[in-house]
Image (cartoon, grey):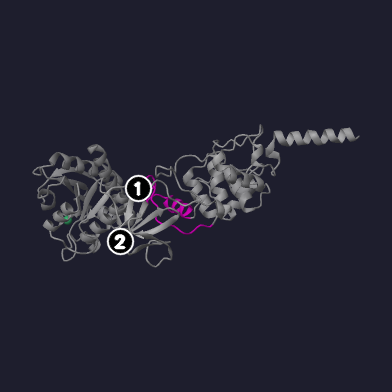
Amino acid sequence: MKKWSTFIFTFFAALLFLFPGFNHKVSATTLNDIPAGSSSEISYLLDKGVIKGYPGNLFLPNQYVTRDEAATMIGRALGLDGTQRATIFPDVGKDSYASGYIQSAVEKNIIGGYSDGRFGPKDKITRGHMAFLLQRAFNLTEGSNITFIDVPKSSAEYTAIDQITTAGLSNGYADGSFKPALPVTREQFSLFVARGLNKDFRVSFLGQPIKEASVNVESWDVLNVRSGPSSDYAKVGSLKAGTKVSVYRYEGDWAYISSGSIIGYVNSYYLSTPTKGHVIAIDPGHGGSDPGAIGIGGMLEKELNLSVGLKVESLLKNMGIEVVMTRRTDTYPTLTERVNIAVNGKADAFLSIHGNKFNAESANGTETYYSTASVRSEDSKQLATFVQNRLYPALGTTNRGVKTANYTVIYSTPLPSALVELGFISNTSDASKLASDTYRNKAAEAIALGIQDYYNWKK
Ligand code: ZN
């Protein structure tokens, strides 16, 4: 009898060893393929029973997570009721192993189905959808204007991705992208959920620094590092004159930096950067006493130009391109002053931003000008073309093409230069787009990408 019970014990122990998925207490050390860099987080989830192994002692870190698996892991992580039952989805019956967690997550407004009413349980969950799921599951509400090169602020996923990154659940890819359309692997999903559950696993969003800089204050002075992008935020450290810092992104005038163990925001005015990269002058047309065109609904061209120009500025800075602004507020530098600001600021190209107007309401569309008289007319034409070709598709406006004209700011300048007319603020369709922040973001993204195209072409 004793022998028999030993056999049974050995048999079940072997079974548990072979099929770790049966035992939620299994520890990561018994699985063969846990990636070393993620072992703490994965062990934590295995111990909590949030995630399970596969037969053969495997974790399968690179396997993609399906939507029903995602709902199950989140359900276990949050301790939701997983009792199998009917769901609101026609394609998730109560026999589905995940039906309880899916229905509980729906009831808690953590997860939703497709617009056609299906849930798509066996579809792979994308990183963008995962961001929504995590943001709701862990009730994240704070964002910090984080910039990923492939997540425009106008995209539906932007807010959720910003919030999960701000909370330290994700920090994107090292190249500054988030890749929202890619499916999520088990390893990635485990990291995100572990960080959601346990603050000790959370990460700081740093990514790749966009540049190195040094602290430029008087030798006896220090530069305060703060927890947020204004002097209202708490001081988290201070840096001596000349200290080297890595800059990760800009939020307005503030730079998010690290220096040794200090991470936070500094006023970018006090950073000096070796000018080795590209410097573009952005000129928001008109300003101050000169409103420019006045469009439908009283839209002032000067305000449109400045709003888009400032958005272009921060996008470019986050791409590592230096920017000289001819104005950052509602003021009027003369046309000659604008050219001088660009030249004195060591700009290597110049882009003026405008909105168009015509007597006939029907006139509409986007166009970009360069001057054939400029000594750099070939470069100017390329700059105009790259910007135009990004801009009209982004705005969905009529392509009026690249044109030539001798406007002062693009004619009397030694720099390759172009002048973009975003659209007609005298046309109902163009004006309604240009009045919206969403389209202004699209315009700014397109212009920034066009400028980047131009610099890539110059290389
Ligand atoms: Zn204008």
Q: Position of residue 438 (x, y in %)?
A: 34, 54
Q: Is residue 302 left or right of residue 246?
A: left
Residue 217: mark: 2
Give whichever of 301, 12 is nearer the camera.
12
**What secondary structure is the stretch in magenta mostly built from?**
loop
The amino acid type of the residue labelled 2 equals Val
Give whichever of 455, 117 is nearer the camera.
455
Q: Position of residue 175 (x, y in %)?
A: 40, 42
Where are the magenta residues, as a range? 139-166
Q: Separation of disc 2 and disc 1 at Cα? A: 22 Å
Residue furthest to the left in view is 373
Give whichever of 37, 456 is nearer the camera.
37
Q: Residue 158: within the magenta? A: yes
| Mark 1 C-beta to ligand 1 under 8 Å | no
Give the residue displayed 9% in from the left and 50% down from the top: 412
Q: Residue 250: within the magenta? A: no
Residue beneath disc 1: 210
Q: Quadrant of the rendered structure where residue 65 is?
A: top right
The amino acid type of the residue labelled 1 equals Ile
